[in-house]
Image (cartoon, rainbow, N blue to C red):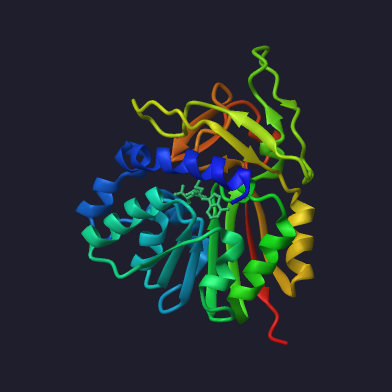
Amino acid sequence: MSEYLRLNRAQWDERAPAHAASPGYNIQGLLDDPGLLSEVVRFDRPRLGDVAGLRAVHLQCHIGTDTLSLHRLGARITGLDFSPASLAQARDLAARAGADIDYVEADVYRAAEVLEPGSFDLVYTGVGALCWLPDIRRWAAVVAALLRPGGRLFIREGHPMLWSIDETRGDGVLAVHFAYFERPEPLVWDDNSTYVETEAKFTNNVTHQWNHGLGEIVTALLGEGLELTMLQEHDTCPWNPLPGFTAEVGEGEYRLADRPERLPLTYTLQARKRSS
Ligand SMILES: C[S@@+](CC[C@H](N)C(=O)[O-])C[C@H]1O[C@@H](n2cnc3c(N)ncnc32)[C@H](O)[C@@H]1O
């Protein structure tokens, strides 16, 4: 296994139980109310359209709260992730919620080998997924291989401009500091925290991440025979991306407190696999 997969997987495995126990993921709320959707999927709904009956796969599904929400909207869904501890939480949530969801453990680059290629109406992913992948063209090839002709990709993701920002200078300035374009070498982080409220302490803290420019993402998908049907940039984000600069605005979304028109924080992209 590559060093980046080993490091990143250890980081996710260690954090999965803490995420499942955190108020942010609201597992108990999802169990108490069988009609409840995760905040991420609630945000997506106006753009997602009707997914009832669709054969869907959620790539990098983590602990399965969004996967369960898509199931509740009627999708026949499979979740895929490389973190066994994340999938243990996802399977437990599905079982306790009485939801029939398949979960598969694999590196996302192997998704078309472990799932039936050309069989999915919908590939759903995002919210902190692409930054873990070194090569966006390889990811686009996997998405194209999974979709049936006419099938659709839906992704809401952190904006590559957001990933390029350093907010930690302490002088009140948001600096464009990290690479916007994909680079072969990873950005190496050593961070003992996580993005939810938790008392848990972590020891697997080194990760390897990559940015991918918006044009690189679109070009990779076009190159794999998909056509773009939606590209919307948002000034909000479903986690607190720039602490000290971003403030919660409701429904789990955060926005720059000062002049939010300066920076897109996320985007929604949809693309359809051409029929021929
Ligand atoms: C931030 S989470 C995805 C967001 C998810 N929507 C959530 O619940 O917040 C990132 C997920 O990507 C998974 N992941 C990272 N690299 C991966 C890879 N190469 N293959 C499969 N899963 C991967 C991690 O295990 C983690 O569960």
Residue 22 shows in the view:
yes
Relative height, residue 129 to residue 164 (above, below): below
Instruction: Look at 70% across and 19% down and name the residue there.
Output: 173
Locate residue 161: give its quadrant. top right
Horizontal placement of 122 versus 273: left or right? Answer: left
Whether residue 132 is situated above or below residue 33 in the rendered picture: above
Quadrant of image for the C terminus? bottom right
| Residue at image coords 67%, 37% | 163
* Residue plotted at (55% across, 44% down): 6
Residue 159 sits in which quadrant? top right
> Foreground residue, 1 or 197?
1
| Location of residue 193 in the rendering, given as x and y in whole percent from the top left corner | 47, 27
- Residue extending farthest to the bottom is 276
Tell me what residue is drawn at x 37 percent, y 60 percent: 69
Q: Nearer the viewer, residue 166 or 106?
A: 106
Q: Residue 234: in sight, yes or no? A: no
Residue 23: % across, % down:
32, 37
Residue most extreme to the top: 171
Asked where in the image residue 151 lies, by quadrant, the reply is bottom right
Number of marks present in the image shown: 0
Picture coordinates of residue 196, whole percent (x, y)? 41, 34
Query: Is 115 displayed left or right of 184 in the figure?
Result: left
Looking at the image, residue 234 lies above or below residue 57: above
Residue 9 rendering spot, x and y as whole percentages: 51, 45
Q: Tell which residue pokes out farthest to the front in this image.
A: 1
